[in-house]
Image (cartoon, rainbow, N blue to C red):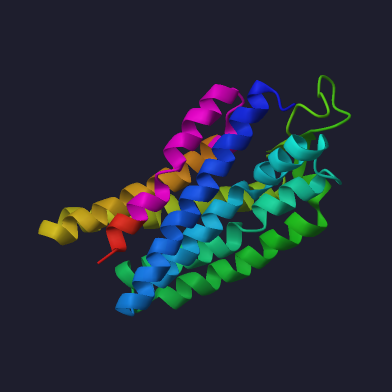
Amino acid sequence: MVSELGLLDGLTATGIILSATIFGLLSLYKSIKLKAKLLTIAALTMFFVGLLWFGPFIDFILVTFTGSNITPTPLYSLLSYTWVVPALIFALYLGGELLIPKKKWILIGVFIVLGLVFEYFLWFQTTESFTWLAPGSPGFVVGQDLIDASFVREYYTFLLIALFLVVALIFLGIGFFVKAKQATGDLRRKFFYLGLGFTIFVVCGALDSILTLPFAIGFVRVIMMTFALWMYLGLKT
C-alpha cells in the first residue's frame, strides 16, 4: 500500500497531468473551431508541461497496482525530464509570436541547439545528472514509497535547466507582465493571465526540484495545477 507521503506525491503529480490535459484539450478544441494557431501552440505547451510529472505519475500507478517501482531507476528521470525541451520550445514560440514576432526564430533556434545538448546529457549521462531515493536506498520501503530524483547541481544538465527556467521567467513571465502594463482593457487582462501562468510554471517547477519537505512540495504542486487554467484564460479568444 502506498504510504501517505507517496499518496501526496502521486496524487499531486496526477492532478498536474490531468489539469494540463483538460485545458490542453479545451485549447485544442477552440483552436480547431476558431482556426487559431496560437491556441494550438498553447495546447501543446500545456501537454508537455504536464508530462514533466510523468515519472512520479507512472511510479505511483506501478506501486499502487503492482507494489513495485519503476525499473531501472534512471528511467524515472527520463520519463519526466525528456519533455523539458518540447515544453520550452513551444512556450518560447508562443511568447515570441506575441512579444517579438520578427525575431522569434533567432530565440527559438538558440534554444533548440541548447535543448539538444540538454537531451544528450539527460539520456547519455543520466547517472551523472541525478541522484535518487529509490529501492536500495536507506529507509526506502518498496511497495510503499515513490522514487524521488534530485539533480546533481554541479553538472551540465542542472546548469542547462536552470538557464531554461531563468530565460522562461524573464521572457515569458516578466515579459507578459510588462506587456500587460502597457496594454489596456481586455488585452491587459489576457497578458496578465499569461504572465501569471508562466510565472507559476517556472517558480513552481523550480521549487518542486529544490524543496525537500513533502507537504511544501504538495502545496507547490497544487498551485502548479492552475498553470494551464491561466494560459487558457489568456488565449481562449
224 part of magenta stretch: yes
Query: x%, y% of residue 219?
Result: 47, 29
Task: Give the percent coordinates (x, y) of residue 87.
Answer: 53, 60
Q: Which residues are magenta?
A: 208-231
- Asked where in the image residue 28 lies, by quadrant, the reply is bottom left
Can residue 99 be seen in this snapshot? Answer: yes
Q: Extreme right residue here? A: 136
Is residue 57 shown left or right of residue 49?
right
198 w.r.t. 32: above or below: above
User: Which of these two is toward me, 154 or 104?
Assistant: 104
- Considering the image in quadrants, where does the C terminus appear? bottom left
Which residue in the rendered view is the most extreme toward the left?
Answer: 185
Q: Name the residue at the front extreme.
A: 65
**Closest to the observer: 148 or 110?**
148
Residue 147 can be seen, yes or no: no
The picture places residue 15, in percent across and down from the top left corner, at 52, 42
Q: Main SS of the magenta segment?
A: helix
Magenta span contains residue 125: no
* Rendering quarter of residue 122: bottom right
- Viewer-closest of 155 and 51: 51
Quadrant that contains the N terminus: top right
- Tell me what residue is drawn at x 47 percent, y 58 percent: 46
Rendered residue at 28%/51% (across/down): 193
Q: Position of residue 186 (x, y in %)?
A: 14, 59
Report the number of discs: 0
Q: Residue at x 45, y 47 (%)?
A: 201
Image position of 236 with respect to 33: above or below: above
* Rendered residue at 83%/28% (across/down): 142
Query: Quadrant location of residue 144?
Result: top right
